[in-house]
Every structure is written in C-alpha cells, then in structure tokens.
Amino acid sequence: MRKFSQFIQQTSFTKAEIVELLKASDNDLEHLFAVANEVKKSHVGAKVYFRGLVEFSNVCSKDCYYCGIRKSNRNVRRYNLSDEEILNAARFACENNYGSLVLQSGELENDAFTLRIENLLKQIKKISGGALGITLSLGEQSSDVYKRWFDAGAHRYLLRIETSNRELYQKLHPGNHSFEKRMACLNDLQRIGYQTGTGVMIGLPFQTIDDLADDLLFMQHFNIDMVGMGPYIEHEETPLYELRNVLWPIGERFITALKMIAVLRIMMKDINIASATALQAIDPLGREKGVRAGANVIMPNITPGMYRNDYALYQNKPCTDEEPLQCKVCLDARLSLSDSEIGYGEWGDSKHFFRRNQK
Ligand code: SAM
Ligand code: SF4
C-alpha cells in the first residue's frame, strides 16, 4: 500500500498529518491526487457541476489590501450591470443547462442593495421556473439581510474567511474590517440554513504551511458544506503589492493550492470543492488540474464580456476578453481532458449539507 492510501477511510486528522500531506514531495503528488480522486468518486461521484458566475458589479465599500477592486483603487472603472443584463445572464445559464448561478459583486450594505438582490432572486426563480440553483457571494451582511435573501430563493452562500489566522487576517485588512464579524456572518449563514461555503487564499505574505493546515482544520471544525480556495495573486494597485518580494514563487502557490484541494477532499469527503478561477490565471489548464486534485465544481464566467476587464481582483485574470458562449465551449473541451462528466442541468448540492442536517 502506498503511503497516502491509509487516509482513504480516515475522517479525523491531526495537524501533524495534515502538514505531512501538504508537504508531499513532487514525486508523491500524483499519488496524493489519485487518493483524493478515489475519495471524491466514492463519496460525491465523478461529475463536475457548473455554476455560471455573474460578477455583476465591481462597486465595493471595503478596502481589503489584496483586492484590485478595493474602494480606494481610483484606477478601476466602476460598473453595475442592469437588472435586465443580470436576468439575461440567468437566461443564458438556463438555456445552457448550467443548473446553478452565482451572483458575486463588491460588498455593499444598504437598503437599496438588499432590496435589489431580493427582487432579482425572485425574478431569477421565476424566469427559470425554479430550475436554477442560486449561490450568493456578496460579502458581510446582517443576519436579517441573509434571511431575506434566503427566503427570496438563494440557498448557498460563499464567504471566504481568507485566512483562519486572526493576526494575519488583521494584517490583510484595514482596522475597520474584523475577523469576529466575518465569523459571526459565517455562523449566521449556517444557522439560517444556507449551504455555507468558505475558503482561503493560498500563498499570502507571511502565511506558512502551519497556517494552511490550521485553515483546513478550521473548515472541518466549522463543518462547512462547500469551499472555494485558490492562490493569492498580487495586483500592483493594492497595498499588499509592496510585499511581493516576500511571496512564494507563483508555481509554489499553484501547487500548494492543488494540494490544499486534495487534502481537504481527503479530510471532508462529501463537501463540494470549487476549482478556483485564480488557478487558471497561473496555468491555462489550472481549473482542470483542480478537478484532477479533487474539486467537483467549476464556475464558468457568464458576465457579459465588456465588463470582465473591470472585475480585476488580481492581474492576468483569465478569459476577460471572451463572451459567455466561448467560455462554455472552451470549458467543455478542457474538462473532457480530465476524465470527468459534467452534471448538466443538475444543482449538484453539497452532500455534506444534507448529511449534517440529518443528525
Ligand atoms: N466582495 C465579496 C467578498 O469579499 O466576499 C465577494 C467578491 S470578492 C472579489 C471574492 C474573493 O476574491 C475574496 O473572498 C478573495 O478571496 C478573492 N480575492 C480578492 N483579491 C484576490 C487576489 N489578489 N488574489 C486571489 N484572490 C483574491
Ligand atoms: Fe471588496 Fe470583496 Fe474585494 Fe474585499 S475582496 S475589496 S470586499 S470585492
């Protein structure tokens, strides 16, 4: 038996074991990914589910030090899709059998925004005859707002913890962003009944393998249903760019992100794991490699092409010059390379969510 096969049935992991897995040598990588894939196939199946991603606005009231669309970046051309453009993207997702939609934007906390999203959710449910599953990724909100959106039809929410290391979190954000608030939001989402997703960036300045092992333990302890995590990629118009000289080489961030996917799959066998777009910014086949490492969700960008350049969280964001249809064709072709079937028209909900709620 090869060294990682012992973990296939294991459900509880020590930090030392996680660190050992994250430190897998280049020679052991294929074996690690094969073990993760075996776990994936036996617990969630071999299918990859699509979530059409609509990045509907880059207007943001926050100032995260790593993000290209932060409030203080004056070079960003701000946009906000009209309701009709968002509904057209939803129609596109339906017509192309994507099964689900993700609405993502910069973070705004105000009554007009809350109401707009609530109305959009109802309209998307209506035009799709209830067929489209809806994930939101709209940052920190009050628990009342989360509940209103849940009642209006959203059933999954993605809010990355970014890093579970509180001190590192504070270094990455201005003083008025708080780790405690983020935790409170994640707790609210779970209590309200969302399939709750979180995630981290990998290869942040000052981050260590120990931190990443703690991130994975955090996810297990929090009992998350889904995860979206990917490499940190610097953007020259952000404060964190000053620390570019202390970063791990980009290739190491990429490989470590794949290892994080594989190790989390082995630890939390039945959750949904998204293969992050940031992987593709580093390697043209990055998202397919994420699927090979244990991910089972892909979020093809279905934002109208003319806005994509303006949602630049980091540099070299892929496919910014493509229209939605081109993206689909390109993804179909690529996924066929990685021995996966696409769950067309299926929601592909987190199996973990249902198991967690049966208890
Ligand atoms: N505003 C919402 C939020 O922050 O949750 C949703 C949109 S935000 C752009 C989505 C994610 O982008 C963040 O959670 C963060 O992890 C990621 N992100 C931002 N800047 C990044 C960078 N430079 N490299 C990699 N990921 C980045
Ligand atoms: Fe705004 Fe989200 Fe970027 Fe932070 S990560 S600046 S909240 S868009």
Image (tube, rainbow, N blue to C red):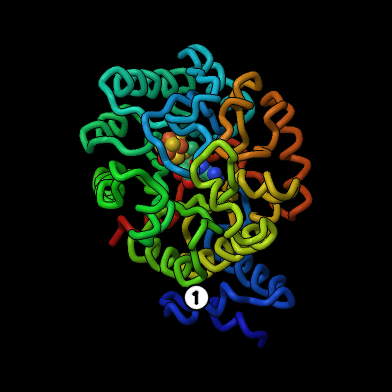
- Compared across the picture, whether 27 is left or right of 9 comes to right
Q: Residue 33, relative to residue 111: is it above or below?
A: below
Residue drawn at x 64%, y 28% is: 96
Residue 307: name its quadrant.
Answer: top right
Q: Is mark 1 within 8 Å of ligand 1?
A: no
Q: Which quadrant does the N terminus fall into?
A: bottom right
Instruction: Name the residue: 54% across, 48% down.
Output: 242
Can residue 28 be seen by looking at this rendering? yes
Q: Quadrant of the C terminus?
A: bottom left
Viewer can see residue 50: no
Q: Name the quadrant where ligand 2 sits.
A: top left
Could you classify mark 1 by the number of other residues whose Cα lies within 10 Å: few (under 14), some (14-19), or many (20 or more)? many
Q: Which residue is mark 1?
A: 18
Q: Closest to the observer: 63 or 216?
A: 63
Image height check: is 270 above or below 5?
above
* x and y, in percent, of residue 11 in the image: 44, 75
Horizontal and vertical percent for residue 50?
59, 40
Residue 114 % position (x, y): 30, 24
Which amino acid, by three-letter code, is at mark 1?
Ile
- As helix, strand or loop, the secondary structure at mark 1 comes to helix
Quarter of the image where one finds residue 304: top right
Identify the residue at horizontal 67%, vertical 70% (top origin).
34
Q: Number of marks in the image?
A: 1
Nearest the eye: 107 or 62: 62
Residue for point 64% across, 55% down: 290
Looking at the image, which residue sits at the far bottom?
1
